[in-house]
Amino acid sequence: MANGGAIKDFAVVGGGIAGLAIAEMLQRSGASVVLLEKNQLLCAEASAEQQGWFHTGALYTALPNNFFCRTMVGNLDDLVDYYGGFPQMNLRVDKHISTTSRDGWFSNRTNFYVYTSRQGVSWAWKLPWAVALRRAKQRMSWFETLDASRSLSHQLGFGSKPLKYVMHSSALGLNLDHVAFALKSRDRAMNTRLIATDLLRSFLASGGEVKTQALVQSLDQGSVTVKLDGGEQPTRIAARHTILATGKDTTAFEANTKVFISPLLVVYPALTDLNFVRMSPHMDQTINHICHRINGLEYSLIGNAVYHDARHTSPEVQDKVRANMLAMAKKVFGEFDARSTDLFFGYKTEVSSSSFIRNYLYHIIDRGHYTLTLPGKFSLCFSLAANVCRHFGIEPVKAVRLKDDASVEAMLQEPMHSRMARRLAEKHHPRS
Ligand SMILES: Cc1cc2nc3c(=O)[nH]c(=O)nc-3n(C[C@H](O)[C@H](O)[C@H](O)COP(=O)(O)OP(=O)(O)OC[C@H]3O[C@@H](n4cnc5c(N)ncnc54)[C@H](O)[C@@H]3O)c2cc1C
């Protein structure tokens, strides 16, 4: 077996957002890292098939347990602390969280939470939903009073606060049935391609090594065995630590993971420029909308809260999901031309032992000769990376350098939704 060069501190397996963010933070903080990706491009799988919603944690204030919210808020702290050196990281923190520019990692427009009234829910849910609505109002008001100039995660402690920031859906101009109230959140759309490109520019500038078309076949103590494209023989790459960030392929190494799929509907041109989630206790009636502005195109990206076990998704199931998604979108947005839509499925990988409550959180799990990581969300890559560093006793470094080379972007896959929107625009609205 061939030997793949000098020993590295870390071999990071998987070049999605989790692997890229972890590799970048470790390398920037003084470790030597090789990032191994089986595809030709980075961020070509789940990280290219997501909605681009940056979560601050406010969405999870409605849950009885504040663990989710605390994790998201901690992620904001890590983002502000360790990513402020990136010129395009435009989230700024003073008394509140805001953006400094229209273009950058984050959109300058916030997302609204629209809560279904009790009228719109089934009998069994009327009482629990009434409790959830009350809690959502109180905790969201509290969330909004967090002083972001101090460490956000240390200010947690849900208490009753005045019901500020609550508005009615009519103020949004949305035509939605049975709305109890709407709340303005600090969540916003994110430009995932820009974020990934910047992370890669930093990784390369600080001396990180990327190997694409490198399929990792086995994980051994102190090395990984890789099949490099074009190579006859597998190559052994020596590394003191191995980090697994393999998304849905984690099932090849770990019996303890499950993969789910969920649909995303692209509509060009955009149906509205308002970003919102319409929340209901009924998952099939929970729908969200993000208006993306990418490559000069403005289009809608619509998601729902229904997940299917990826092992049981026949073409029939996919057709049913597509029909339900279109029906729900038409209910919320009114009639639109179905020809200017396209649908794809995103993949979500979870630790199956906690599938009872879908885990939207990141995981860092030691398995002896490797460390398993799952981000839960694209949004959480910042805390995931900082905490992997801490996990290995490395203090994350704040200063960043960026490789100033236009070719870096070409190493990353364009998100599925912007590719689809471009195709829809070319097909149905060709420029004369
Ligand atoms: C419908 C949907 C919408 C979503 N929307 C959002 C959203 O709006 N906001 C948000 O924050 N999150 C969202 N998510 C979650 C987000 O997409 C994922 O949490 C995140 O992208 C996962 O990143 P990852 O790096 O773990 O996985 P991936 O991007 O899949 O990366 C894993 C990589 O490992 C590589 N790999 C696998 N096996 C090997 C091997 N043996 N050797 C070498 N390489 C290997 C793969 O090729 C792949 O590139 C959404 C998820 C779904 C399903």
Image (spheres, rainbow, N blue to C red):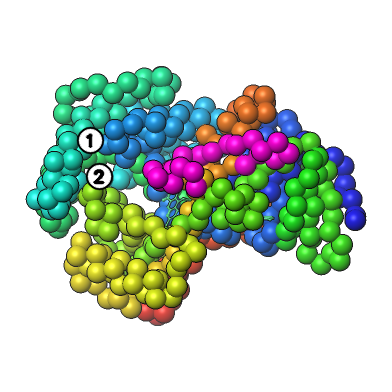
Task: Say left or right for 157 vs 215.
Answer: left
Closest to the observer, 389 or 205: 389
Closest to the observer, 120 or 256: 256
Q: Where is residue 108 in the image (x, y as percent from the top left)?
A: 36, 43
Closest to the observer, 354 or 74: 354
Q: Residue 406 carries which label?
A: none
Question: Could you tell me which residue is drawn at 39 percent across and 43 percent down?
Answer: 357
Q: Where is residue 175 in the image (x, y as percent from the top left)?
A: 14, 58
- Give the labeled residue for mark 1: 136
Q: Is residue 359 magenta?
A: yes
Q: Is disc 2 in contact with disc 1, using a CB cutoff of under 8 Å? A: yes
Vertical relation: 315 (above or below) 397: below
Label 1 CB sits under 8 Å from any ligand 1 atom: no
Q: Position of residue 10 (x, y in %)?
A: 74, 39
Q: Position of residue 2 (x, y in %)?
A: 90, 55
Under circle 1, the secondary element is helix
Under circle 2, the secondary element is strand
- Amino acid type at mark 2: Tyr
- Amino acid type at mark 1: Ala
Magenta residues (range): 352-372
Q: Can residue 204 be seen in this view?
A: no
Q: Does the magenta stretch include residue 417?
A: no
- Give the labeled residue for mark 2: 113
Vertical relation: 237 (above or below) 412: above
Task: Say left or right for 18 vs 149.
Answer: right
How many numbered circles does the render carry? Answer: 2
Vertical relation: 118 (above or below) 261: above
Question: Could you tell me which residue is drawn at 15 percent across and 48 percent down?
Answer: 124
Q: Dot 1, crowdedness within 10 Å: few (<14), some or many (≥20)? A: many
Q: In which quarter of the image is the N terminus?
A: bottom right
Task: Say left or right for 27 vs 239.
Answer: left
